[in-house]
Amino acid sequence: MSAFSFFIGTMHGLLQVVPAVRAWLDSIGSPYGGPGHMIDPLAHAHINLVGGVTILGMAITYYMLPKITGKAMYSQRMAEHSFWWTTIGVSAFYIALLIFGFIEGNLWLTDPAQVPAIHRFYGPVISIAASILAVGFWVYLANVVMTLKDVYKKGT
């Protein structure tokens, strides 16, 4: 998932510097405001940093922590849950940012008065995606803390 996210992120970055795409993004407020900021930098940063870096960090932790401590992870099931919640959350977050950015960006240029009608859905959709992502982070953190608690309790 990390490599796939980096692939999507690099394709996204490549596309957003194509002159015609860059001009469109700039015309809708990228990167400082307006709908353009949802595509660049928000969507681009999240797929790279959360999808790429964070999931890679989670994988490294799940692989290395048992090797360093000599103890198994507290819960393999929690590890799997953290992966899937984080993956689904970051994917939904990225896709929602792109969809709202494109829809609102086109409205921004053609019928700006319609932007608030669409934007009212943005908060709830992003909140759901972010909450799913947060569950993945919290399950990961709980698994690591419980693993370390077990390690220190046993004096290892």
Image (cartoon, grey):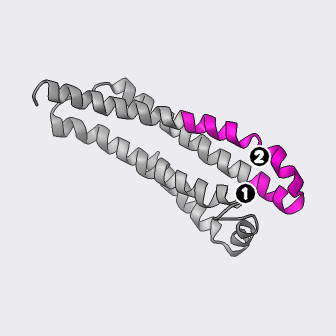
- Could you give the CA–CA distance between mark 2 and mark 1, rounded to whole angstroms? 9 Å
Q: Is residue 76 visible?
A: yes
Q: Is residue 124 left or right of residue 5?
A: right
Alpha-carbon neighbours of circle 2 within 10 Å: few (<14), some, or many (≥20)?
A: some
Above or below — where is 156 with respect to 22? above
The image position of residue 110, as x and y in percent, is: 88, 60
The dot on residue 137 is none
Q: Which residues are magenta?
A: 102-131
* Membership of 149 in magenta stretch: no
The image position of residue 30, as x and y in percent, is: 67, 65
The dot on residue 119 is 2
Residue at mark 1: 35
The residue at 46%/34% (across/down) is 136
Indicate the amino acid at tag 2: His
The residue at 75%/68% (across/down) is 24
Instruction: Tell which residue pokes out farthest to the bottom in this image.
Output: 19
Above or below — where is 27 with respect to 133? below
The residue at 11%/31% (across/down) is 156
The image position of residue 73, as x and y in percent, is: 27, 29
Q: Is residue 88 visible?
A: no
Name the secondary structure under disc 2. Answer: helix
Name the secondary structure under disc 1. Answer: loop
